[in-house]
Amino acid sequence: MSPDLEVLRSPGTLVVLDTSGPGLPRVLHWGADLPDSAVEALPLLARGPVPPNALDQPWPLTLLPTGGDGWLGTPTYAAHRAGGATAPRWRATTTRDGDGTLRTVAEDGGIRVEVVLELDDHGVLSIGRSVTNTGSDGTADGDAAAATLDLAALRAVLPLPSRATEVLDLTGRWCRERSPQRSALDEGTHLRASRRGRTGHDATLLLLAGTAGFDFGHGEVWATHVAWSGNHEHLVERLPEGAGMHGAVLGGGELLEAGEVRLAPGEAYTAPDVLFVHATDGLDGVSRRLHRRQRATRTRATGPRPLVLNTWEAVYFDHDLDRLKGLADTAASIGVERFVLDDGWFGGRRDDHRGLGDWVVSEDAWPTGLEPLVRHVKDLGMEFGLWFEPEMVNEDSDLVRAHPDWVLGPRAGRPRESRHQQVLDLANPEAAAHVERQISSLVGELGIDFIKWDHNRDLHEAVRSDGRGTDRPAVHEQTLAFYALLDRLRAAHPDLEIESCSSGGARVDLGVLSRTDRVWTSDCNDPLERVQIQRWTSLLVPAETMGTHVGPATAHTTHRTFDLPFRMLVALQGHAGLEWDVSACTPEELDALRAWSGLYRELRGLLHTGDLVRDAVDDGALLVTGTLAADRAQAAYTVLRTDSARRATPGLVRLPGLDPERTYAVRVRPEAGMPALVQHVAPGWWEAALSGELRLDGALLSQVGLPMPVLAPAQGLLLHLT
């Protein structure tokens, strides 16, 4: 193979760069694997035709395309010195590290950029970028201001072929995160930008492009994810002139506000990694690669995920030792393994208007401290968890009264409040150290096993004064300070687990997930809403890191009422738990929860390690979600009806992904919750599946399917196959 071609390969995925020129490498291919003979021919294909009224020679799509390359789309690198700017003429060198990573270093005019490509064994490509100001300090020519490099963007993009004609992304709001939306990949820029200071309820976890009609199990798909918890953007862009030999580009990066990153000589900026995934087997293929990557790199919280009870929807701010001890007694009796005390235990926090930021145990609510409750919980054999919101403060708090300058905001005055909160300036070392000391001392003194780490507002007017009378954008520094605080706490308490909660699911990304152990998927415990929220969150997040709880019969956020079987069935699809006053349950409800928790412990080894498959039938109103063991020797399928449909019965429902050469024992697991089979005849296989006597071929189940019982909306069942 030509020495000018650099190739990255993992099973099914190929990346090819052309390093023959003096500038940045050209991206010749990202997608399905090709034989070496085809790889050798790619440079020839790169020399495409030149249309009228265009550049006289074909222009390349480089690793950082700018106007200097002939690229007229969104630039991947943009910067200036005191208003002066030019498209760099990079002089680049590409090397291969011992682990197969490709590293390109390029320089021009006192600027050095580094682009690192790493393709893992699961088919996930990570692109890291950094820029360093290598210029002089300007003292020789008296122009020190021009020595500063003001960075506007450092994005990563990769090419898409012309057969990618559709775009899928996600949007949402509080309690309705991850709502899918589709559009044609037309000419122009499809940009998803978040300026919320956190990932956002409306953030698209992935931006995906694919062949016409791609879905969970079919079609060729290209996807990207920005692994960052602050302001960010994803984009897909098609120009009339094309993208070199390609049809469009896909990518993203951190969204930088004007003046946010200013590099003095010798200073550097490192951009968050942007991940790229290609799959020929639809969205399930994308998820499989991303889930396997996360599981392979996880070094903490690797044991069985404990069944959780969180106290918020059980007691809210009404903290009483005897009541909570009784709640813990009931929780332990039904198999709960982790008891988490939510908001209301600290400072003057009797409601959500005050006390936030004072991370000391309230003498009013807890006159004897938290130790009696912690001891009681641990004596019952459960772990103990505690709620914090370290990045926010109430104006009515001891912290703000003592340190008003620790509140993030402009010199002109406080930002508008949200949820009665302001933001604590974590980039202030004193503020960060204060919070760290308070949290760390409680973790050590009480033996806290788990923190529910909340973040309940967007960062409006996230600016700070630079000490010279200038307000500067602060989201970038605030995000890095948050990461650093997490890193220090985890280093000090190696066994501590942390959940990323952000008024539900507003901080779900692989930046925060590299430092935490699960996410709270949504503040909405309405199971009918949760079906879709969990389904689309699982595009990126594997089940074991996605918090899924059984709530009360009447949902706190929607006021709709659901029976217990459906609530249990939906909560089984992730890291399961309860958010409910189970001490008020009937004996029958407790028996049902006890059986459900036993089933969770039995199946979590499968549900939290297996490959996800998803399907929708009957006009999309009947959803199938399956988890298959890597060797396909075991599987669990949840079949849920979310709405009525035109037809009385949905026809045959396939169970995708099974080994066609095997025979499976098919069981209905009533512990997960049973549908109400009334006023109709169950399908012929039903009784045999209930008794454990049904045996069927994998080919029949995955290619032909089963007739399902007639299910009303908000009903479903769990099939367990071995």
Image: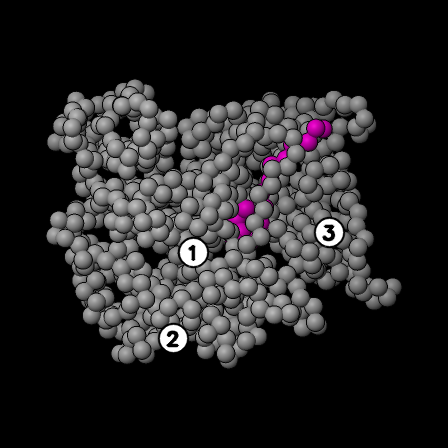
Q: Quadrant of the N terminus?
A: top right
Is residue 128 magenta-colored?
no
Amino acid carrying label 3: it is Ala
Q: Does dot 2 land on a helix, a strand or a loop?
A: loop
Check the image and name the residue furthest to the front.
Answer: 559
Magenta span of residues? 226-241
Q: Is residue 509 visible?
A: no
Please tell me whether residue 189 is drawn above or below residue 618 in the rendered image: below
Q: Nearer the viewer, mark 3 or mark 1?
A: 1
Q: Is residue 181 left or right of residue 349?
A: right
Is residue 229 magenta-colored?
yes
Please tell me whether residue 380 is drawn above or below residue 630 in the rendered image: below
Q: Quadrant of residue 607?
A: top left
Residue to which mark 3 is pinned: 79
In x, y percent, where is residue 239?
A: 68, 31
Q: Earlier in the sequence, mark 2 or mark 1?
A: 2
Residue to which mark 1 is pinned: 503
Amino acid carrying label 1: it is Ser
Residue to which mark 2 is pinned: 347
In x, y percent, where is residue 94?
A: 67, 42
Which residue is depicted at the point 35% across and 44% down? 530
In x, y percent, where is residue 619?
A: 37, 26
Residue nearest the viewer, comparing 600 with 214: 214
Residue nearest the viewer, comparing 358 with 558: 558
Q: Quadrant of the C terminus?
A: top left
Check the image and name the residue furthest to the right.
Answer: 141
Q: Is residue 274 left or right of residue 60?
A: left
